Amino acid sequence: MDYDVVVVGAGPAGCLAAKYAAKNGAKTLIIEEHASIGSPVQCAGLLSTSAIGECEVVLDSGFHPIKGAFVYAPDRRRIRISGGEIKAYVVDRRIFDRTLAENAVRSGADILMRTRAVGIDIEMETRGHGHGRRRILHVAIEGEPDVIEAGVVIGADGVQSRIAQWAGLDTPETILSGAQISTVYDFDDLEFVEIFMGSCAPGFFAWAIPYHGSARIGLAVRPGFGSRSAWAHLKRLIAEHPVVSGKCDSGIAGIVLGGIPISVPQQTAAEGLLIVGDAAGQVKPTSGGGVYPGAVCAKIAGKIAADAVLEGNTSARRLSEYDKLWRTRIGRELVIGRRINEWMARLSDSEINRLVGVLDDDELLDLITRYGDMDHPSVVVRKLLMNRKSMGAFLKMALMR
Ligand SMILES: Cc1cc2nc3c(=O)[nH]c(=O)nc-3n(C[C@H](O)[C@H](O)[C@H](O)COP(=O)(O)OP(=O)(O)OC[C@H]3O[C@@H](n4cnc5c(N)ncnc54)[C@H](O)[C@@H]3O)c2cc1C
């Protein structure tokens, strides 16, 4: 098998990268180790309207609309953030990812299921594609060893990316541990998600997300914060949290466990190779959402990979244009998000109680509603830092630490 671009992994990032490689004229293949796309699910499925737009997926009646959030402090005080409009949807990632894969196929990409990448080499070009070097991808197709030649390999193989490791690229250094269950939950408003801050989810937060008749209750824990696993924290949240325990049914219909990378490596391009999505730590550090940033970067990766192969120059230098372009587009937002996450992670329960108390103010809630954007949290943080009331409270909190 010989392709211009081979994408490893049929998650959202892989499917979009393949779609854009194929659309830009490259003979493209996606390989996926599982027998079914989108499975096992490792996601709460909460996607902003812009994430869905970026993925180029048409709204479906199966998507569950979300208009806002209740944010709970450890002392149970809560603030309501809502602009009245639909801000996000909750989706079934199995169906969502399959739609993305079909879109890639419609654009001309091939897909091989039950095909796992097991190694990668590089060899001198001898035919066809100019003076570049070719990547040799070692694969197991339904367990049988084989090789696939590629001008460019795109590693979209998720948080534990082997492609990045084999290529000698750094992998994300901070990975949150996530755990989630599907169950029944007594939501106050089925168009609102609930967020729980504080030591119930050390270094991050817990969530309750409505999806039609059921709920996805989960949390993530930052490494080095708290002595228990994410799963142990989740069991405790359900059994003991003053709000969640009273609203959550004890029956569990499904369990999701997974890592969420919240730091980006130094380099995401090498000779004849790019990494994208979770493999490249392209995840919002404030929310753990990876679909939006992964989609933005995957489209850039697909186009650059196709252009480079068709020009006959797949050198690391040529492909580093991808690295430059995606950092220009969302790099700053990820860096600011990381700082916000680090600051929030270190707040004690009593500091979070005070912070939520400060934000529980008509003027500040109006500001959050107007400028809050799931995909660009730096905008509202800047507004809060420029506001006399909230800035005064933040300074006081910083001085009291
Ligand atoms: C508990 C939890 C909740 C989350 N909730 C949200 C949310 O609400 N909203 C949101 O935006 N994000 C959420 N995320 C993050 C989101 O799921 C990821 O950011 C997103 O799936 C990353 O997409 P991706 O395409 O980069 O990788 P993935 O979706 O992980 O896809 C990688 C694919 O590569 C395949 N693969 C891996 N290795 C190989 C190999 N060697 N050969 C062939 N195939 C291979 C895998 O089978 C997989 O299909 C959540 C994550 C967790 C853990």
Image: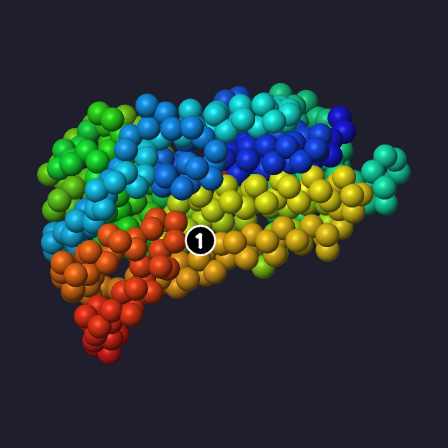
Q: Nearer the viewer, residue 317 or 246?
A: 317
Q: Residue at x 14, y 51 (%)?
A: 78
25, above or below 272, in the image? above
Q: Residue at x 30, y 64 (%)?
A: 383
Along the horizontal axis of the image, is 291 left or right of 16?
A: left
Along the horizontal axis of the image, is 338 left or right of 279?
A: left
Along the horizontal axis of the image, is 229 left or right of 330?
A: left
Q: Secondary structure at mark 1?
A: loop
x, y percent for residue 121: 75, 41
Residue wearing tag 1? 262
Q: Quadrant of the C terminus?
A: bottom left
Along the horizontal axis of the image, is 135 left or right of 299?
A: right
Does residue 217 appear anywhere in the picture?
Answer: no
x, y percent for residue 63: 33, 28
Q: Nearer the viewer, residue 326 or 161?
A: 326
340, above or below 395, in the image? above
